[in-house]
Image (cartoon, rainbow, N blue to C red):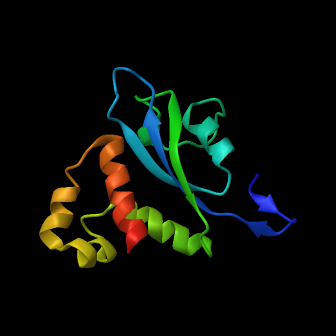
Amino acid sequence: MSVANGNEKFFHCYLLGSLDPKHPMKSYVGFTVDPHRRLRQHNGILKSGGAWKTKRSGRPWRFVCIVYGFDSQRTSLQFEWAWQHCDRSLVVRNAIGDEAARKIKRKRGIIGQLYMLKILLTE
């Protein structure tokens, strides 16, 4: 449920991992106010919504982790962007350096995404 007490929204960033044996390294980072509904969209259970990157291959998807506790939608979207673009994020580049930030982008799959998340959460 995305609304508490009738007017307070909770903002989430999440990491999906593919359960398709043909695509074991496939992952996706996104934002939502309703994780349960969003996962159903990605898996094609709900017809509207779901990112185009998760439609062709990788289904079914599962949550690997959900990050919450953001003050606003804006901060959660900024966090999502930094997670998706760690090589361009100033937060990441200032924390680990430009060269390391470029190398981190090459890390693939769920392990690579969790490594990037660790850097974002410790800064």
What residue lies at 39% left-to-right and 70% top-to-bottom? 122
| Extreme residue in the left direction | 99
Give the quarter of the image for residue 86. Answer: bottom left
Q: Image check: 11 left or right of 56?
A: right
Residue 70, percent from left and from top: 59, 70
Q: Is residue 60 above or below residue 109?
A: above
* Number of marks: 0
Q: x%, y% of residue 52?
A: 46, 41
Residue drawn 49% across and 44% down? 51
Is residue 101 toward the left or the right of residue 45 in the image? left
Q: Give the residue displayed 35% in from the left and 50% down from the top.
A: 113
Left or right of residue 37, residue 31 in this image: left
Residue 108: x percent and y percent? 26, 44
- Most extreme residue toward the right, as rendered? 6
Residue 71 horizontal side relative to residue 3, left or right = left
Query: Relative to 4, does residue 59 appear above or below in the rendering?
Result: above
Taking the spot 34% from the left edge, 65% from the top edge, the residue there is 119
Viewer-nearest residue: 106 or 111: 111
**Where on the picture, by quarter, is residue 89?**
bottom left
Relative image position of residue 98 (x, y in whole percent): 16, 72
Q: Quadrant of the C terminus?
A: bottom left
